[in-house]
Image (spheres, grey):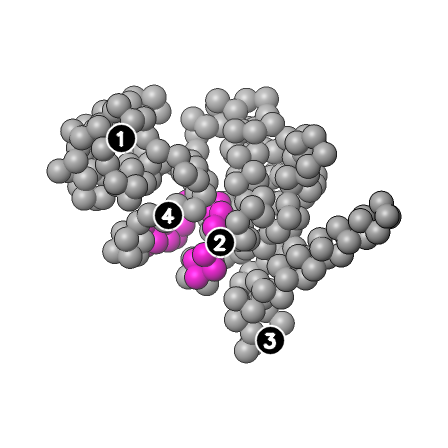
Amino acid sequence: MTDGEGYLVVAKDLGKRYGDFIALHPLNVKVSAGEFFGVFGPNGAGKSTFIKLLTGQLRPSKGGVEVLGINAETDPQKLKANIGIVPESESPPSFLTPSEFLHFVGKLRGVSDLENKVEYWLDWFGLQEKRDTMCKDLSKGQRQKVMLSSAFIHEPRLLFLDEPFANLDPIYQRKCRKWLLDLVSNGGTIFLCSHVLEMAERMCNRMAIINNGKVLASGTVKGLKESESETLEDVFIRLVGHSIEEAERLTDDAKGEEE
């Protein structure tokens, strides 16, 4: 891959297949430094597969990925050391405490002034009272705060977030939104996957709508709307609805051929 100059994330003809099932059709995406790029779609649309391919957690069946100039397939460990990742539905290790886990992550990533940074994020997320509680005994929201802290602690220039606000109360959703927007305004870059359209309106410079493993449309939030009166929800339903209808038509055609 040689056409990614000037971009932090480059996916070229990227696809993923499991046997006969196509989880992600070949697609091309480029994300520049300083962007807040969002991928939105219904549950099962392929968003998590997409982000796992970009972060070296899965190997592509087709195409390739470069992130920060690093080949995600051939050097996933180097890639993971230089980015922040909050995976969907992943919790910190059960038998570590929040303090122990953040110290572990910080040492792994070579964080300077680690003790102060651990204390900062425990305070920031209101976890001081739970700092010595094993993570298995935390609530879902508290475990999510620990995962976010572990992604933020080394101050990466590029963050990959998969449904990052799941289980957070509205206070911490707002607090995290502000922190992420400040990060982007100071030159950071964020790649977000979610099904919450409100986040696109509030946060994203550009976005893509995905369903059935295909990108249906991409561009600015304003650019995806066909008129000033159309809401982003209208855009989503228009695009995803057509995608579902097409999938149902193809299924019916296949059944007809079998008969």
At x 55% / y 78%, what residue is drawn? 229
Residue 257 is left or right of residue 225, and the answer is right
Quarter of the image where the N terminus is located: top right
At x 26% / y 30%, what residue is drawn? 136
- In this view, the mark in front (2 or 3): 2
Q: CA distance from mark 1 to mark 3?
A: 49 Å
- In this view, the mark in front (1 or 3): 1
Q: Are marks 1 and 3 in contact (CB under 8 Å)?
A: no
Residue on which disc 4 sits: 166
Q: Earlier in the sequence, mark 1 or mark 3?
A: 1
SS category of the residue bearing label 4: loop
Magenta segment boundaries in residue numbering: 176-200
Q: Amino acid at mark 2?
A: His
- In this view, the mark in front (1 or 4): 1
SS category of the residue bearing label 3: loop
At x 43% / y 46%, what residue is drawn? 163
Quadrant in which residue 219 is drawn: bottom right
Q: CA distance from mark 1 to mark 4?
A: 17 Å
At x 26% / y 23%, what residue is drawn? 95
Residue on which disc 2 sits: 195
Q: Earlier in the sequence, mark 2 or mark 3?
A: 2
Q: Which mark is residue 227?
A: 3
Q: Earlier in the sequence, mark 2 or mark 1?
A: 1
Q: CA distance from mark 2 to mark 1?
A: 27 Å
Residue 106 is left or right of residue 214, and the answer is left
> Which of the two residues, 217 or 29, is positioned nearer the viewer here?
217
- The residue at the far front in this view is 259
